[in-house]
Image (spheres, rainbow, N blue to C red):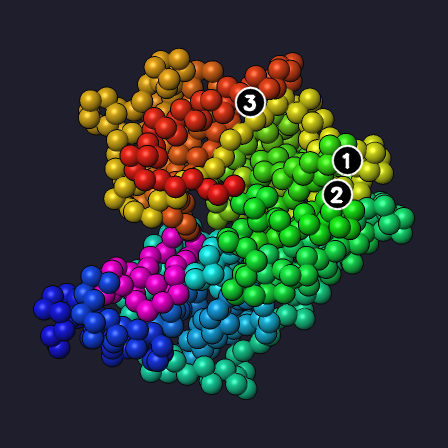
Amino acid sequence: MAKHSGDAALDEQIDMWLKWDRNEKTLNEIKQMITSNDWDQLKKRLLERLAFGTAGLRGCMRAGFDSMNDLVIVQTAQGLCEYIKTQYKQDEYQRGVVFGYDGRYNSERFAELSSTIFVQNGIKVFLYSRMVATPFVPFAISQKNCLAGVMVTASHNPKEDNGYKVYWGNGAQIIAPHDKGIQQSILDNLEPKEESWNTGFLKNCDLLEDPFEEMYAAYYKNLLQNIPQIFRDINKKHKELGDIKFVYTAMHGVGWPYVEKAFEEANLPALLPVEEQKEADPDFPTVKFPNPEEGKSSLELSIKKAEAEGVTVILANDPDADRLACAEKDPKTGVWKVFNGNELGALIGWWSVQNYKALHPDVDLGDCYLLASTVSSKILRSMGQVDGYNFVETLTGFKWMGNEAIQLMNQGKQVLFAFEEAIGFMFSTSVLDKDGVSAATHLATMTCYLKETQGITLTEKLQQIYETYGYHCTNCSYLFCDKAPVIKRIFDRLRNFQDGKPNTYPKSILNGEFPIANVRDLTTGVDTAQADGKAVLPVSSSTQMITFTFENGLVITLRTSGTEPKIKYYAELCAKPQEKDWPALRATLDRMVEAIVEEFLQPTVNDLKPKTD
């Protein structure tokens, strides 16, 4: 072993990188750090490894085992391939593995490297020949009964990042035990095989197939089957009248051609793209963050376009088109409202039930299920209690909702809809993950239906929902924190709150004005609301997540993001239908959240940065 730094562990990793990396750019990046004696940076890059998190990998594109690059992708694909070989028999290899990619730097390269490794192992590969929306990967798995699938995308992360999102053969994102099994298999197969780098192997390879044309046709056929003809006729009427139009932004991602095609198939009115953001561009030049969840700051060009065209509804996908944002202009005040994810969940959730009833007039809603993650609004639960359908709460993320939907389907149940507050929506079970293309189509159809049947807007429909089922006000946001020790200190303090005693949590806020009734800690498994003090939902010690339920009914969850350097919080107050003083509820919620953030997270002490909008 060569002596570079004098640190044996680091020198061993340096030698491995110099021996294994075949990418000239990242190889030279490490060599330059050695020349500069930048041992601290090398320790960070080479002694830490990018681990499987939310259904796969996500990180900065640069040299190092802690980052996204050719070598880490080769290691990951080798490990994933070997794990799949342990889970399936050889005669099943022809079922194949799907690979898709978005418009980010290196996405296509990472998909091709991965495909190379799988075909060299005798496993059929369905590699999309062009950029696709993320939903096209899980859709293809379900349609073609594949072994697994990978979407190379970092979704709405900054342009420097990329990701590797893994789905299992059931069409949902991976969960235990597969996530741990794949991670171990990667560690067991770190040394790249020489042939793993040879993407030329893909040329004229009998095991390689492009599924695009087949899946493109099947996706839209499936989408139309979930829209009643009567609703498509209403769409067509308003398309011909020209009294409804939509502005759309792809946020420099892949969404435009897929949403344009969906609108065409569903007979929807004109869709006017934000030209500056229409084509995929890995530099995301017009936005600070390519994330429509950021609110008005990410929709400036969309609002400008809508104002110029006299349009009152804006639809926005994130760059891989699996999320959907929406804004609507108040025709009386001229003010734009950007719906949050919980509000859109209420609207599209309500619409999913109306849509299903129109497709199946004699349906028994007692066999129907709507899902939401634990940090999302419980508005669907309130609606189900009145309308007769079932509501299921899962852990945070669509990997849980997708797998829960599969379990319900296996029991003969109908899953109509699932959502999370981070603007992710699953309409029907055609795709067992969030799908921004279908969500945009259904929300636009709902817009036409509301205008046709009641002459009302989306905002007015939301008010109707609150009037009928009770006002659900939420306050969800986040603070930036990229220092793991700080995050650990914050949550450790909350678990040792009473004079440093273990397993003691805060009892109130604002000097006792608002007492806390129960605490659920899904990191440690504590739930004081349960008779045995143990949490019902699955527990994970690798993530931070604490929920406080106050005596006045406010529920707030504090958690770390699985994909970004953020501490997120999600608060909700649910009113009964007869409670009509909504401004007072909102004022109480906001006052309490402000106090919780200040007292529990201590932003100034911990140097936490608030979101921009």
* Residue matched to label 1: 331
Q: Quadrant of the N terminus?
A: bottom left
Report how far apart the C-alphas of labels 3 and 2 lie in the structure: 26 Å
Q: Which residues are magenta?
A: 42-68
**Crowd rating for badge 2 (residues with CA inside 10 Å; few <14, some 14–19, many 20+):** many
Answer whether residue 56 is magenta in the image.
Answer: yes
Depth order, front residue of 451/125: 451
Residue at 56% x, 66% y: name it.
281
Residue at 54% x, 29% y: name it.
474
Instruction: Please state which amino acid type lies under the numbered disc 3.
Output: Arg
Query: Which numbered disc covers residue 586?
Result: 3
Q: Quadrant for residue 566, please give it.
A: top left
Q: Secondary structure at mark 2?
A: loop
Residue at 32% x, 69% y: name it.
63
Q: Earlier in the sequence, mark 2 or mark 1?
A: 2
Residue 185 falls left or right of residue 249 = left
Residue 413 falls left or right of residue 591 = right
Report how far apart the C-alphas of labels 2 and 1 lie in the structure: 8 Å
